[in-house]
Image (cartoon, rainbow, N blue to C red):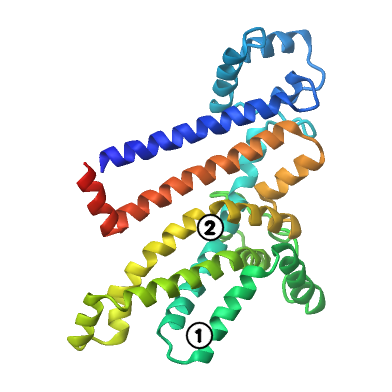
Amino acid sequence: MIRYLIRRLNLFLATSLILFIVMFIAMSKFPVERTVALTGIHSPSATDVITMTADYELDGNAFSQFVAYLQQRLSGNLGISLTSQNPVVDELSAVLPASFELGFVAGFIALFLGIPLGVLASLSKNKITQHTIMAITLTGYSIPVFWLGLSLSLWFGVHLGWLPISGQINLLYEIKPVTGFLLIDTLMSNSQYAMSAFIDALLHIILPAVTLAVLPFTVVVRITRSAMISIMEKTYIKAAEARGLHTSTIVLRHALPNAFIPVLKNLGLMLGAFASYAIVVEVIFSWPGVGAWLVSGIYQRDYTVIQGGILAVALIIIFLSILIEVMHTALNPISRKELYASN
């Protein structure tokens, strides 16, 4: 297992290195001065020019410049924003928690609703129930996320007035950030309006989270259904039925844990699509996350923000993909057997 983890770590490092190479090449193609693209400083002084030349090895060859670029980025120096003149790493740290919070809530909704529906679709003998569930998943998978987000905003936000359609919380509430996750920070707050702030934050996250959850929800339902149908035909399931175990016991203790393994694997494969959907959702609902921040940087031609946002999103996707692969291997008995056999 140690060898396997080392190989996964090497894969993460190699993939990240390729990402930095691509970003370094793309940065050199930006239609601005190289120093501006690297640091975000519009009109550098003589001292700034000397510092930048030394930090980024601008007098050296391409390889030495890349090594210097890599050292600066890995040290947390992402430059300053061309528009706000604030450090990009500070702005990134401010918007990352909102994106993680939205992603976690959307993922929870997808799993909480998708797995039971997938199990129901696989076990139900009623053809109408099966076809209805599969029709819902096919429809959800086919609907463009931007159309769904705008439609939900129009129906539940504008026409019915049930839910807010933009932002993360009402600006009247002043919540001191502790964890960065607003739902948690509101509960941890000592304010007398903490519960009201929590409810307000919860109402704000419903529409964007539901919109973002539709894609993984449909995938979870279909994969769970397919896995459950296959597993329920296995010999050990038939043996459990022959021993007189209740169906719910068989499903919860024997079938569902094994059915979750392919679900986990497919969730890892769709992280890229999930991230792109999240960017669109954040823009639609004015959610103060990385996606909206990155799109704003693109509109304003803020090249340091663009680099910082792409690097952050890509590295997170690479890390989570490899982490999910490791979890899949650890939970899957077949994969563990093959792993130990190879060692």
User: What is the C-alpha distance between the residues marked 2 and 1?
Assistant: 43 Å
Q: What amino acid type should be assigned to the residue bearing mark 2? A: Met
Q: Tell me where residue 38 sits by quadrant.
A: top right
Q: Is residue 191 above or below residue 22?
A: below
Q: Residue at x 26, y 59 (%)?
A: 333
Residue on which the image places disc 2 = 188
> Residue 327: x percent and y percent?
36, 53
Question: Circle 1 — which element?
Answer: helix
- Quadrant of the image for the C terminus? top left
User: Is residue 280 visible to the viewer in this orientation of the structure?
Assistant: yes
Kind of residue sitting beneath label 1: Gln
In this orientation, which residue lies closer to the viewer: 181 or 295?
Answer: 295
- Whether tag 2 and tag 1 are in contact, CB under 8 A, the answer is no
Q: Which mark is residue 130?
A: 1
Toward the left, the furthest residue is 243
In the drawing, does residue 130 fall left or right of residue 85? left
Q: Measuring from the top left, give residue 288's x and y in whole percent.
A: 69, 51
Which secondary structure, mark 2?
A: helix
User: Residue at the location (43% across, 64% down)?
Assistant: 263
The nearer-to-camera label among 2 and 1 is 1
Q: In which quarter of the view is residue 7 placed?
A: top left
Q: Count of labels shown?
A: 2
The label shown at residue 93 is none
The residue nearer to you, when weighing 227 against 108, is 227
Q: Pointer 2: residues within 10 angstroms few (<14), some, or many (20+)?
A: some
Q: Is residue 190 visible?
A: no
- For marks 2 and 1, the one nearer the N-term is 1
